[in-house]
Amino acid sequence: MKCLSNQRVRLFLRHCSQHRSLLRVGKELHAVLTTSGSKKAPRSYLSNSLFQFYAASGDMTNAQKVFDEIPLSEKDNVDWTTLLSSLSRYGFLVDSMKLFVEMRRKRVEIDDVAAVCLFGVCAKLEDLWFGEQGHGFAVKMGLLNSVKVCNALMDMYGKCGFVGEVRRLFEMLEEKSVVSWTVVLDTVVKWEGLENGRKVFDEMPERNAVAWTVMVAGYVGAGFTGEALELLEEMVFKCGHGLNFVTLCSLLSACAQSGNLVIVRWVHVYALKTGEEEMCDHVMVGTALVDMYAKCGNIDSSMKVFRLMRRRNVVTWNALFSGLAMHGKGRVVIDMFPEMVREVKPDDLTFSAVLSACSHSGLVEEGWRCFHSLRLYGLEPKVDHYACMVDLLGRAGRIEEAEMLMREMTVPPNEVVLGSLLGSCSVHGKLEIAERIERELVQMSPGNMEYQIVLSNMYAAEGRSDVVDRLRGSMRNRGIRKTPGMSSIHVNGSVHRFSAGDRSHPRTKEIYLKLNEVIERIRSAGYVPHVSALVSPSEVDLEDKELALCFHSEKLAVCFGLLVTKPRTPLYVFKNLRICQDCHSAMKIVSKIYDREIIIRDRNRFHQFKGGSCSCSDHW
DNA sequence: TTAGGGTTAG
């Protein structure tokens, strides 16, 4: 150690922080420095080097510890801001915010860099209140003269959905940078839709890879494959913007959202051609692939990518587990859990994924065991975990047990918990409990009619037409607020979208003829329309009920698929809401009679219909 | 030490 000057120690530590493989060496050096006492070296100098090392390498526990050991008088505002930005970069957002408060209290100078960090944290947390306080402070200190601070502030408002404020700040900016434009673009695409977003994009005086990515991902996510491909090719081939790992993640995530396998293939071919293997080796890209394949219906590819990955983190595992959950593979998740805990420390989301996997597979006892083991991993059961447990017990028909657990919660149950329990009551015909739960839900969210619809359907199933008429009458008077069901099907690289009773498709006539044929054939095979599961007051007239069921969007999408694809081609359909019971039983029979595999991704999970049954074993 | 696009649940 004698030959190492302080300057060298600093350089060496900086080198260590930049190379993952040297992190351990840096820590060992720390240990040596601590034991050797290095009396000659000024302690604060070494502490400062060590602090920079830990902060840069993301070991925030040690960074914070070393930082606290440096006397206040020997820390300047750059040190404070380094800690602030590292906490934010490595995801310790609340700690970062607390640090900012401490900086103000200790009268540490807040410069433009610190302000940028603060707004970044507020944006990530979508904490408008704190962001507004920061805005006031920034105005007072004249920090808004910096375009970077303004951009960060606009981004904060954008992430919180305040498009007007973003535009106002943008107009006020004297020198708009390409980042300022990109913040506006991203905000507009997110909150005002693709068309308005495209207007901003076309107006931009200069575009870089980020702007292109925002626009392309916007198209991909909304299912506009043609526009996405056109733009993607222009971006890469005409403008020469290569895809980096962030672009890849962004595109893959958009593909996952819309189930777009065409773009996935394009991205894959591009990566192979440009020899970007190391990019595919990136843990975030790998995780995005695991997630994308699972969400696009291909759980085997998801698992294959997972096994090929050289590095995995807790997010990778969570992505795999939630993918398996969606595919009803709860047993696989339970079996893999011990392997996971040997590799990474599970977090809250892990338990949500495992519990939801149990729920989708009807594994009640395993679910209880998992719920009880939360504390073993240093976690407290949160409202989401309770929601999963209530869902699991409810689906399994153990409604009373589910309600008891809900009443035991330390925090009051939210809409998710109550809504899930109401759903289970409806499946298992528990009218009395349902009435109670519905009252609580209506109080919590008075404008939402869906709960009343569920309850009125339950009365209808019991033959209580007097109550049904009264409820539906009042609903009709107040107007309903129900998300319209939409299904889309991917055929030969393009997406076809259908809503219930849709007649806008160019091949409508053929589709409805096919629908008639399908209904007739499945009826003769034993299909009975599930009329009691009806759904919206617009469908209340009894004679219209069966008709309304026939026109559900997923049936139209499947009929279109049967019409235009070769025999035995699997059909992939994506639905924005949960598939209804009637469509579920109809699809089983369709899969058998037409010898087709039908894969439907609904809001919660995948249903793979094959040979007359569904992969969910009716746990949904 | 600093702004914009990025992986996980419901």
Image (tube, rainbow, N blue to C red):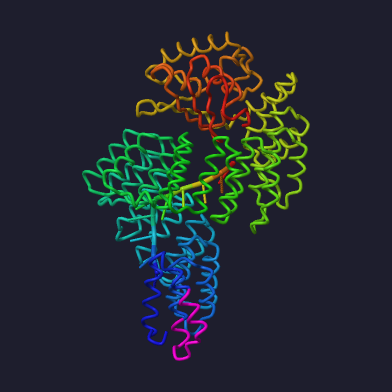
Q: Residue at x 47, y 34 (%)?
A: A297
Q: Is residue A35 magenta?
A: yes
From the viewer's perspective, is residue A386 above or below residue A501?
below
Give A549 or A579, whichever is nearer the viewer. Answer: A579
User: In the rendered view of the protein, which quadrant contains the N terminus of chain A?
Assistant: bottom left
Specify whether A422 is left or right of A77: right
Give the side of residue A475 with respect to residue A344, left or right.
right
Residue A272 to residue A114: above or below:
above
Residue A468 spot, x, y in % from top left: 71, 22
Total number of numbered labels? Answer: 0
Q: Nearer the viewer, residue A499 or A517?
A: A517
- Extent of the magenta region: A28-46
The residue positioned 28% from the left and 52% from the top of the image is: A208
> What residue occupies the far bottom of the structure in this picture?
A40
Residue A287, given in percent of the width and then of the height, sits at 45, 48
Q: Residue at x 51, y 74 (%)?
A: A103
Residue A580 in which image quadrant: top right
Q: Is residue A269 magenta?
A: no
Q: Main secondary structure of the magenta part?
A: helix
Quarter occupied by the C terminus of chain A: top right
Residue A166 image point, x, y percent: 41, 53
Residue A515: horizontal and vertical position, in percent? 48, 14
Q: Nearer the viewer, residue A479 or A131?
A: A131
